[in-house]
Image (cartoon, coloured by chain):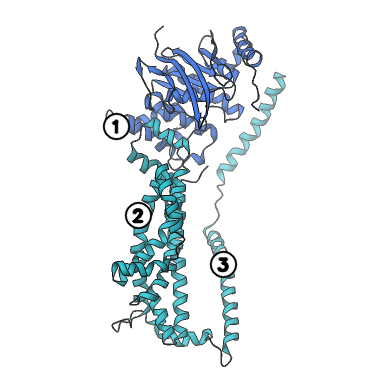
């Protein structure tokens, strides 16, 4: 038995030795042009289908709305009516008569402010509720009730409290987006495996180190889920809130366009709102992906 | 016999509501410096609970753990644990996982460069230096456990606690890693306490085997000395009379006198 085993070893060893240099001498690397072609193909596969769908939908819209007496304008009329707004988003004639850029940037500033506050407060409260059983018992029922209140229902109360539109709008953003952040963070903290806690205990990390080195990285995927839902809700709430508080902002721009019967402007504004909402969502998702790249469970 | 690690009359009772379960009863054990002791028993006999008590992760109900005549009741790097499922932090690289403990333990006694060298030294001991920048998800189960061992060793523990360290590995990887642990024990002379449910593993690696009776109220049933000279070679021992006799003794204990009774 021993004999045959040695023999097999010898037989396999010889061909391996002759093959090895051949492999080493011809390093296979795809030419650069080929790599570019593949990249172009991959991009085309992802970009062409949505473009086709958009073109078809636009065509249907055009056909449906072109006949006389139609309540809504067809895309060609929308474009003709709003050409000035599209090509000159930066004009500023004082008051609320400004380009779309200024309206959008005013809305984004409110969202940035309110959302930052809610991210900080939400993660902090989420950690508290996730870490302490008593905090959870005390606060969780409260959160569960408060989070079902529609964003706009807070607006009259916050106007009464702040006596000004700007902080009220920011408060509405804050109160709308904070709940998913709190709840997801708390779930993330509660789901930190006992193993990681044991490791931290053996290494004797102090609470601050535990927070930074174990808790936040371990809960990061959950936290970013909450942040992503939160940014979506903030963008939903800002348009509604601005319709009511007035002033510069994309919400009031839409409301103003409706009052002046500029339906084409409403459609253009909706288009921008959608694109920006999408970009915000991608931004947070991308940030989450970047931050949590190593956290995925094995 | 000088007691390096002493388990003194340890009882453990779990209370859940009105129901109380006595898991461990009157555990007494002394371990000498440099000794390799295994604790073997059927699943559910409380051997992992015992290890957690020694590690300080769980408190004993009565009794205590003495390390060099000083009571220890909270976790610390002097009793580093190699966990069954490696427990590496997935967002850190191999190097960073080991460094986490090193930075804490040697914060004052070693300079930055010395700590770095010490991390690499320990990764070299387990032959994992080549994977220093890999994340746990990129290496195999056996490699993860090697890094787990390096992390524990790097804390220079007085006692190294191994909680079924090879349980989750395939047979070949397990044998390879057992040999590595034996070589490390030979080289560094650590005091090691290992939880296991593998009879061969216990006989091969240990100086003494502590056999636990079935729970609830598990006790130490018997302690067996393994009088085999070191270094031990797996292949030579396969037909060794002493090895076979020790193996026989443990098997008899586990399968005749304290047969595992399936919980209803």
Instruction: State the residue in front, B10 or B225.
Output: B10
Mark 2 or mark 3: whose residue is earlier in sequence:
3
B109 above or below A234? above
Residue placed under numbered mark 2 in the picture: A120
| Label 1 secondary element | loop
**Mark 1 crowdedness (10 Å alpha carbons): few <14, some 14-19, many ≥20:** few
Q: The chain coloured blue carries which letter?
A: B
| Label 3 secondary element | helix
**Letter of the chain that mark 3 sits on in the rendering:** A
Residue placed under numbered mark 3 in the picture: A44
Give the Cα distance between marks 3 and 1. 54 Å
Same chain assignment for discs 2 and 3: yes
Give the Cα distance between marks 2 and 3. 40 Å
Q: What mark, if any, has residue B107 been given in the picture?
A: 1
Residue furthest to the bottom in view is: A68
**Quadrant of residue B221 within the rendered picture:** top right
């Amino acid at each position: 038995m021993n004999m045959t085993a040695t023999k097999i070893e010898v037989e396999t060893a010889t061909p391996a030795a002759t093959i090895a240099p051949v492999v080493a001498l011809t390093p296979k690397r795809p030419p650069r042009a080929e790599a570019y072609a593949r990249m172009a193909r991959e991009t085309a596969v992802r970009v062409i289908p949505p473009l086709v769908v958009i073109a078809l939908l636009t065509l249907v819209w055009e056909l449906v709305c072109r006949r006389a007496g139609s309540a809504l304008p067809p895309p060609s009329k929308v474009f003709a009516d709003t050409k000035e707004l599209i090509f000159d988003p930066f004009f500023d004639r004082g008051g609320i008569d400004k380009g779309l850029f200024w309206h959008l940037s005013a809305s984004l500033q409110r969202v940035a402010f309110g959302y930052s506050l809610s991210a900080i407060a939400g993660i902090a409260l989420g950690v508290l509720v996730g870490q302490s059983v008593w905090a959870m018992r005390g606060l969780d029922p409260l959160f569960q009730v408060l989070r079902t209140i529609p964003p706009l229902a807070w607006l009259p109360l916050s106007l009464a409290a702040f006596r000004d539109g700007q902080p009220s709008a920011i408060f509405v953003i804050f109160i709308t987006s904070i709940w998913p952040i709190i709840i997801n963070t708390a779930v993330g903290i509660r789901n930190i495996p006992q193993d990681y806690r044991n490791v931290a205990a053996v290494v004797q990390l102090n609470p601050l180190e535990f927070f930074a080195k174990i808790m936040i990285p371990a809960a990061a995927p959950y936290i970013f889920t909450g942040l992503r839902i939160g940014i979506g809700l903030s963008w939903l709430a800002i348009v509604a809130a601005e319709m009511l508080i007035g002033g510069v902002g994309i919400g009031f721009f839409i409301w103003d366009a409706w009052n002046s019967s500029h339906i084409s402007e409403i459609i253009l504004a909706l288009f921008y709102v959608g694109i920006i909402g999408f970009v915000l969502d991608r931004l947070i998702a991308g940030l989450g992906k970047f931050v949590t790249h190593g956290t995925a469970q094995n | 016999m000088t007691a390096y690690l002493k388990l003194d009359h340890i009882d453990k009772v779990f209370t859940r509501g009105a129901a109380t379960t006595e898991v461990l009863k009157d555990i007494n054990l002394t371990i000498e410096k440099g000794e390799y002791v295994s604790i073997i028993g059927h699943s559910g006999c409380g051997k992992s609970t015992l290890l957690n008590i020694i590690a300080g992760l769980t408190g004993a109900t009565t009794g205590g753990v003495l390390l060099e005549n000083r009571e220890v009741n909270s976790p610390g790097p002097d009793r580093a644990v190699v966990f069954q499922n490696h427990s590496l932090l997935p967002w850190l690289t191999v190097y960073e996982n080991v460094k986490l403990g090193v930075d804490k333990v040697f914060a004052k006694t070693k300079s930055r460069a010395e700590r770095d060298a010490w991390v690499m030294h320990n990764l070299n001991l387990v032959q994992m230096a080549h994977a220093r920048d890999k994340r746990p998800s990129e290496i195999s189960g056996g490699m993860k456990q090697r890094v787990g061992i390096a992390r524990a060793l790097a804390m220079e523990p007085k006692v190294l606690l191994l909680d079924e360290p090879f349980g989750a590995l395939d047979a070949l990887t397990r044998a390879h890693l057992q040999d590595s642990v034996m070589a490390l024990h030979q080289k560094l002379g650590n005091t090691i306490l290992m939880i296991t449910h593998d009879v061969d593993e216990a006989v091969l690696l240990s100086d003494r085997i502590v056999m636990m009776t079935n729970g609830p109220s598990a006790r130490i049933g018997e302690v067996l000395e393994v009088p085999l000279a070191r270094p031990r070679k797996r292949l030579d021992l396969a037909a060794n009379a002493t090895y076979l006799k020790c193996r026989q003794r443990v098997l008899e204990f586990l399968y005749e006198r304290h047969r595992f009774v399936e919980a209803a």
